[in-house]
Amino acid sequence: MTNGHLTEAEMQQYALDSNSCTETIVTHINHCAYCQQEAMIYKLMFHRIEAQEKAVFDFDLTELVMARLPQEQTTHDKSFLYIITTAIIIMSGVVSYEFGNNIVDILSSLTPMLVSLVILASFGVMIFFGVDMYQRYKAQMKVLDFY
């Protein structure tokens, strides 16, 4: 008890279910006008809250959220992909036509230094694209605001 009166929690407990309260709380409320008034206010408030209509959502939340999400934009043009693929096939055909049977001799004469440079450059390109892909992923997650 605070200042001779019941606490807010005790009065709320009494207002919700007086049968579950201790006898001390019931006795105090029966003899204290201030606590009776506060308990009645809580009872009235709880009754009004229970009497309110349940909230009804007459809209489709999924549709509203999906409408606000940014639309996926195609960043790769199909024609560009076809042009690059055609160019690679043509270059491969020209190389195989020009060098024909000598291609095995040319590849076997490559120095280990050149092979290691090609491998190193390949790993560098893969790391570059991996970091770029991760940065785009983080930017998209920030747009969705999950963090």
Image (cartoon, rainbow, N blue to C red):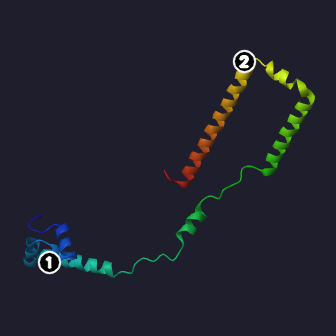
Tell me where residue 89 appears, x and y as whole percent: 85, 39
Q: How far apart are the alpha carbons under marks 1 and 2?
A: 94 Å
Identified by mark 2, the residue type is Met
Q: Is residue 130 above or below residue 13?
A: above
> How far across and down, in percent of the image, does residue 115 sit?
73, 22
Q: Residue at x 28, y 80 (%)?
A: 47
Residue wearing tag 1:
36
Q: Which mark is residue 113?
A: 2
Residue 95 disc label: none
Question: In the displayed structure, does residue 99 sit left or right of residue 117?
Answer: right
- 140 sits left or right of 122 in the view: left
Q: Please give the name of the residue rendered at 19% of the width and 71% of the height, measured from the top-left corner.
A: 13
Question: Where is 32 relative to 2, above or below?
Answer: below
Give the amino acid type for the residue marked by disc 1 in the picture. Answer: Gln
Q: Quadrant of the N terminus?
A: bottom left
Residue 74 horizontal/vertical position (percent): 71, 53
